[in-house]
Image (tube, rainbow, N blue to C red):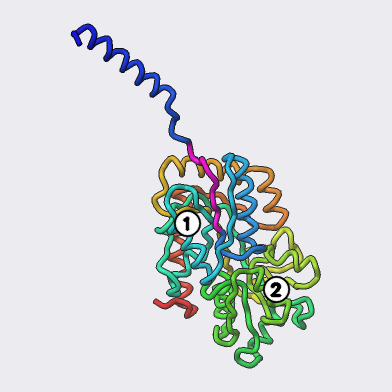
Amino acid sequence: MNRRTGLKFAGVALAAFGMMASVAPAQAEYPERPITFIVPWGAGGGTDAVGRILGSLLEADLGQPVNVVNRTGGSGVVGHSAIATAAPDGYTIGMATVEVAMMHHVGLTDLTYEDYTVLAQVNIDPGGLMVRADSPYQTAAELLEAIKNGEDGEFKGSGTGQGGIWHLGQAGWMLAEGVDTAKSPWVPSQGSAPALQDMVAGGVDYVTSSLPEGRALIDAGEVRALATMGDERLAIFPDVPTLGEATGTDWTVGAWRMVAGPAGLPDEVVEKLIPALERAYNSDEYREFMEGRGLGMVWRAGDDAKAFMAKSDEDFGKVMSAAGLSDG
């Protein structure tokens, strides 16, 4: 092969390579397949409801199926672990709840907010106090007096897992009222929905989850709301007093929900998910859904949301220690 022929062959080869490169498929943009959205609590509760509305809105926005999966167990540890230990590729995300700032304080897990890529806070709700509709106690003050005067262990509360946010709500209320937390034992549950059903069936005497989580049973006449543990009354329950109004206590507590993935999510995934979540949060569908159920709306994204989690972790650790719920 002479020099001219060699140059001609090289030119043909380069041209062919250029044509191949031009038709080679570009790397697919995230997401290119279905996303799993993990809810660490049972179906029918507030976390499940928020997870499912967000999942449907994300699915419409991202153009891929978003499959909501309830991973219950271990007082929230199972589902939260599934989010934290998933491959950091954006195809498994989930709802990290306030229990992330609590579970490790009671020795249930080593997980903390540091084990997640925090995408956004989308909700916060105050606790509440509910009894069966046929309960003889018409007010929070009447229930409190009965607990104080009853036998140890006579009145049982529930609402979430051991050391969970509504357990802290109950224990903090007892302490604020000068009642030993051992006086009224806590019965762990896999979320507010099963706790409320257990109460209706007579398994426990009261539930301290948020009032919106009990709304269906309240509307059905099976549950009576006695108080909210927030600073003010809820718009959907204007006749239900705050705990401060009902018993004079200054105890308040609330639960928050964050959308998160495992630590180390790639920037391109984060930069796709946070704007999609913000669009979902600002949509008419989300607002109508949340307001219709009395669920509180709060938006924090990225580092701001993670800083809020870190502060909650520190504050809850102090309160849990005082309530005897911490193993530290």
Please name the amino acid that badge 1 sits on. Phe
Q: What is the crowding at mark 2: few (fewer than 14 residues within 10 Å), some, or many (at least 20)?
A: some
Q: What is the crowding at mark 1: few (fewer than 14 residues within 10 Å), some, or many (at least 20)?
A: few
Q: Nearer the viewer, residue 314 or 206?
A: 206
Q: Earlier in the sequence, mark 1 or mark 2?
A: 2
Q: Is residue 216 above or below residue 64?
A: below
User: Most extreme residue toward the top, as rendered?
Assistant: 4
**Start and end of the magenta stretch?**
29-38
Which residue is depicted at the point 39% across and 50% down? 264
Overall secondary structure of the magenta stretch?
loop
Q: Which mark is residue 197?
A: 2
Rendered-image quadrant of the N terminus: top left
Q: Nearer the viewer, residue 173 or 221?
A: 221
> Which of pointers 1 and 2 indicates the residue nearer the eye?
2
Which residue is depicted at the point 60% across and 91% down? 152
Q: Nearer the viewer, residue 174 or 89?
A: 89
User: Most extreme residue toward the bottom, as rendered?
Assistant: 151
The question of residue 30 being in magenta is answered with yes
Q: CA distance from mark 1 to mark 2?
A: 32 Å
Q: Nearer the viewer, residue 172 or 289?
A: 289
* C-beta proximity under 8 Å, tags 1 and 2: no
State left or right for residue 7 relative to residue 70.
Answer: left
Residue tagged 1: 308
Rendered-image quadrant of the C terminus: bottom left
Q: Is residue 75 above or below residue 79?
A: below
Q: Which mark is residue 202?
A: none
Please name the amino acid that badge 2 sits on. Gln
State left or right for residue 54 relative to residue 23.
Answer: right
Could you say where residue 149 lies in the image, as x and y percent from the top left? Answer: 66, 91
